[in-house]
Amino acid sequence: MQNIDGEPDLQPTFHFKHVGPISDAQLQLGDLTVIAGRNNTGKTYLAYTLYGFLKFLPSLLDASILELERTRRPSNLFPDFYDITKKLVQDGRVHLPADKKLLLKQKKKLVSAASQAFSKQALSNVFNSNTVDFREASLNVLDNRPIPDLYGKRFCGAGVDLSIQLESEEIVIAVDEEEKKVYPKDIHRFVCGSYLRFLMCHEFPEPFILSAERFGISLFYKELDFTKNQLVDWLQKLGNEEKRDRFKPYLLIDRATSRYALPIKDNIHYTRGVPDMKRDQSEIFDGKLYDDIKEMMGGYYRSSEDDMRFVSKARKQGKFNIPLHLASSSARGLSDLYFFLRHVANRNHLVIIDEPESHLDTQNQRLLARLLTHMVRAGLKILITTHSDYLIKEINNLVMLNGSFAGKEEVCKGHGYRANDFLPPESIHAYVAENTQLISCTVDEFGIEMPVFDETIDQINKTSNELTSRILEDLELQSVG
């Protein structure tokens, strides 16, 4: 399998067990990942678990590194870091044999340790649930991406400037010799930690999520700030300054939102922070993908410290400028994505959208498929959960348009497609959540084969044809009689 640039698609495998309705499932991310399925089949559980792991991953890796650092030799997989440190202090340079298969095993061990720590210590917290509810749940991550050739990193800390380079058949660990410094002998932990971080040659994506609750967040997020202000005003009226200082109104607000799952809390925090982003430009700002949302909604969004507003594109007739909470649910649902594309997005983001088609009419669902394609082509990774046959069918159209066929230019012109609407099938990974598992879907030059929708449509058409036939027969009999 290949990605959108035609490169071999070696992505980490995420193995979920006993997460909500899901008993056993494996998932690999594509440039566009689609999880479809009926209600209550575990799609959101998977999305939230993946979000939580990626969100906590930096701290999980640090914890795993600290755990491995505590022993002289973490396992037979790893070199003796005390011996490396001793030689490094003496000579300023250490040469190790470079066995790429061994390096890959070491990296797998590190990632596996992080995923095990997540399963035991953080998974239930993602859902703000009792640990008993997730006592059997786990996420195991397998990263098979090879260590690249001529790869190196620099690390600074503990009074040391350290470089680790992979050069043909050896690893060279060296300290900066120009300073002619006498390094302390207690830099073992820094050397060990640097080596383990060196193994993480491939980044995991940075997650950003738009939860299904985003429609309500745009309604009540200002209430949180208003309540904060009310509490502060009330405190100012208290006569006892000592009591006033001990009372923390912001903690009350945080506790009020603590009953929500982590993705929802983060969604609330993001929405509340939008006014502070207005001077920032995302890495993909120049692509103006937010204009796709402007086209879909017939308007755009503005933010200030006081509120967020939805403003129409129309200059005269039909002009409006209203608070976002008075806008349609479709406009509210796309507001966070609009600001994300303008101010936040970077090319290492995985954008997770729970049911992106919610509250959109069928034409806008088709335009949404094109926006998702534009986001993929801009370098973002996308994961969606969906119930929309219209969205999948339009994605399939964009896949078919990626191929070569007679009359393609005429088709594109006739139906309003542009070259940046095309989506290579190799960039898509698609799944159906069904029977407590994830079933991988075939993706080829015709798009995604999605039986969960096709079977339902076939049933509707079969019922409709039979009813039409019987009514017509009855009308004929009545006319004859």
Image (cartoon, helix red, strand yellow):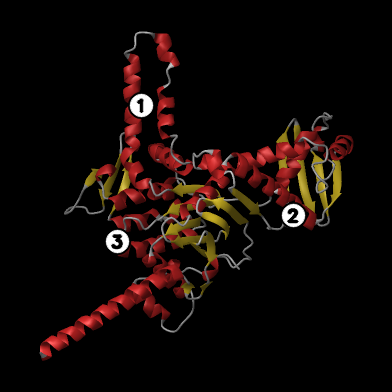
For the C terminus, the image quarter is: bottom left
**In this orientation, which residue lies closer to the viewer: 186 or 240?**
240
Mark count:
3
Q: Is residue 382 visible?
A: yes
Picture disc at residue 361: 3
**In this orientation, which residue lies closer to the viewer: 36 or 219?**
36
Q: Position of residue 421 (x, y in %)?
A: 43, 67
Check disc 2: other Cα within 10 Å, few if <14, some if 14-19, many if 20+.
Answer: some
Which residue sits at x=45%, y=71%? 451
Q: How far apart in space, not on screen, are marks 2 and 3 (Cα)?
A: 48 Å
Q: Is residue 55 visible?
A: no
Q: Earlier in the sequence, mark 3 or mark 1?
A: 1
Which residue sits at x=43%, y=21%? 248
State whether residue 460 is above or below residue 326: below
Q: Residue furthest bottom?
A: 480
Residue that label 2 marks: 104
Q: Amino acid at mark 2?
A: Leu
Which residue sits at x=59%, y=53%? 17
For the N terminus, the image quarter is: bottom right
Mark 1 and mark 2 in contact? Answer it, CB < 8 Å.
Answer: no
State whether residue 42 is above or below residue 406: above
Q: Position of residue 439 (x, y in %)?
A: 53, 65
Q: Amino acid at mark 3?
A: Asp
Which residue sits at x=72%, y=57%? 148
Q: How far apart in space, not on screen, are marks 1 and 2 (Cα)?
A: 50 Å
Picture disc at residue 228: 1
